[in-house]
Image (spheres, rainbow, N blue to C red):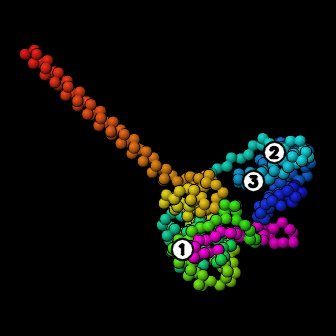
């Protein structure tokens, strides 16, 4: 595993991805399977390993993430003819439920925005609610990335904490990195009110970073601390900072912004990803669509009913005339 992650994985992934892989290998895979010979590792061994991950309290998504790393490493061993078959093939994985996306109500959003506008360090909250940017993107945003002439924000980098993989280092370290995916490099149009707010913030700035702390950048932990403090001050329920991104997306859907535009604003890798995440948020739009269809059906039914009534009236009139004719003939 050590050779695989250093020689195969590390050259082709971001630092944060490498740190995530390394952490899962050290904490889960090596303690359970590190002493096993590759050619002695069976399908049943891997199945038992996956089953044991659940008993350790790992969520289904985390179990699957650990399994994918193990499977990738063993597939490389298979491709290199070190082993004949990948023992991960056919292993049963836990079912993953759909994650519930938490978004603020309109009233909560308005209350939070009012509080953030009055707060000296509220810019991160405003940016998240008005642009849908991720916390790492907001923390790494510099004033040079905000173009007031073109009314645009350029997302060019991100910031985050990763687990260290050396005994001589602290447990975690802060890194600046490229955005999450190629699609995360994006230009976000700057609306007038947000631009006016940021212009005032720039006049007061003491750092090259839009979100600052003591004359330098503010890392995600600091931004989240400020956010939780603001929620507590306003009497709002605790939630993660990422909920502000979901709130932005939810408001866009409520305003009937098309899903392709929303996907690009969020920096998603595909429109399908946006649809998968926000299907529940689109329920109201789905209701409206069904109501429109229902109106068409109602109109068609009404038209059919009216035509039927006209036909019945005409037939009754004809019968009346025939009856009158028969009576006249009898008389």
Question: Which region is colored magenta?
Answer: 145-173
Q: Which of marks 3 and 1 is nearer the N terminus?
A: 3
The residue singled out by tag 3 in the image is 65
Q: Is residue 23 left or right of residue 320?
A: right
Which residue has dot 1 on it? 194
- Counting from the top left corner in percent of width and height, residue 161 is at 74, 69
**Real-space Cα distance between discs 1 and 2?**
51 Å
Q: Which of marks 1 and 2 is nearer the N terminus?
A: 2
Mark 1 or 2: the one toward you: 1
Q: Residue furthest front?
A: 150
Which residue carries the number 2 mark? Answer: 88
For label 1, the SS is helix
In front: 322, or 31? Answer: 322
**Residue at 89% across, 57% down:** 3
Residue plotted at (87% across, 55% down)? 4
Name the quarter where the N terminus is drawn. Answer: bottom right
For the C terminus, which image quadrant? Answer: top left
- Residue furthest to the top: 330
| Magenta stretch holds residue 159 | yes
Query: Callout 2 environment at 10 Å: few (<14), some (14 to 19), or many (20+)?
Result: many
Q: Are marks 2 and 3 in contact (CB under 8 Å)?
A: no
Q: Which residue is drawn at 73% across and 46% down?
A: 93
Alpha carbon distance from label 2 to label 3: 13 Å
Q: In this view, does 30 lie above or below 148?
A: above
Q: Nearer the viewer, residue 204 or 117?
A: 204
Q: Callout 1: few (<14), some (14-19), or many (20+) C-alpha neighbours within 10 Å?
A: some
**Label 3: which secondary element:** helix
**Residue 127 in view here:** no
């Amino acid at each position: 595993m050590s050779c695989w992650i250093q020689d195969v994985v590390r050259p082709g992934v971001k630092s944060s991805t490498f740190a995530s892989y390394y952490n899962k290998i050290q904490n889960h895979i090596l303690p359970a399977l590190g002493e096993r010979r590759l050619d002695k590792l069976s399908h049943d061994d891997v199945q038992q390993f996956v089953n044991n991950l659940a008993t350790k309290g790992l969520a289904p998504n985390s179990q699957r993430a650990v399994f994918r790393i193990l499977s990738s490493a063993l597939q490389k061993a298979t491709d290199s003819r070190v082993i004949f078959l990948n023992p991960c093939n056919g292993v049963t994985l836990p079912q993953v439920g759909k994650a519930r996306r938490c978004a603020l109500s309109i009233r909560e959003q308005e209350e939070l925005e009012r509080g953030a506008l009055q707060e000296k360090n509220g810019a991160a909250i405003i940016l998240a609610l008005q642009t849908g940017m991720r916390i790492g993107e907001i923390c790494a945003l510099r004033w040079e990335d905000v173009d007031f002439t073109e009314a645009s924000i350029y997302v060019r980098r991100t910031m985050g904490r990763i687990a260290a993989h050396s005994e001589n280092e602290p447990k975690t370290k802060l890194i600046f990195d490229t955005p999450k995916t190629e699609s995360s490099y994006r230009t976000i149009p700057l609306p007038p009110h947000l631009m006016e707010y940021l212009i005032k913030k720039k006049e007061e700035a003491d750092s090259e970073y839009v979100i600052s702390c003591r004359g330098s950048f503010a890392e995600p932990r600091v931004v989240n601390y400020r956010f939780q403090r603001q929620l507590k001050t306003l009497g709002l329920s605790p939630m993660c900072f990422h909920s502000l991104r979901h709130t932005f997306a939810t408001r866009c859907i409520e305003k009937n912004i098309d899903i392709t535009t929303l996907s690009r604003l969020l920096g998603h890798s595909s429109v399908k990803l946006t649809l998968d995440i926000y299907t529940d948020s689109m329920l109201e739009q789905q209701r409206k669509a069904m109501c429109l269809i229902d109106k068409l059906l109602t109109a068609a039914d009404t038209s059919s009913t009216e035509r039927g009534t006209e036909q019945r009236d005409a037939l009754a009139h004809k019968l009346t005339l025939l009856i009158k004719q028969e009576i006249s003939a009898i008389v």
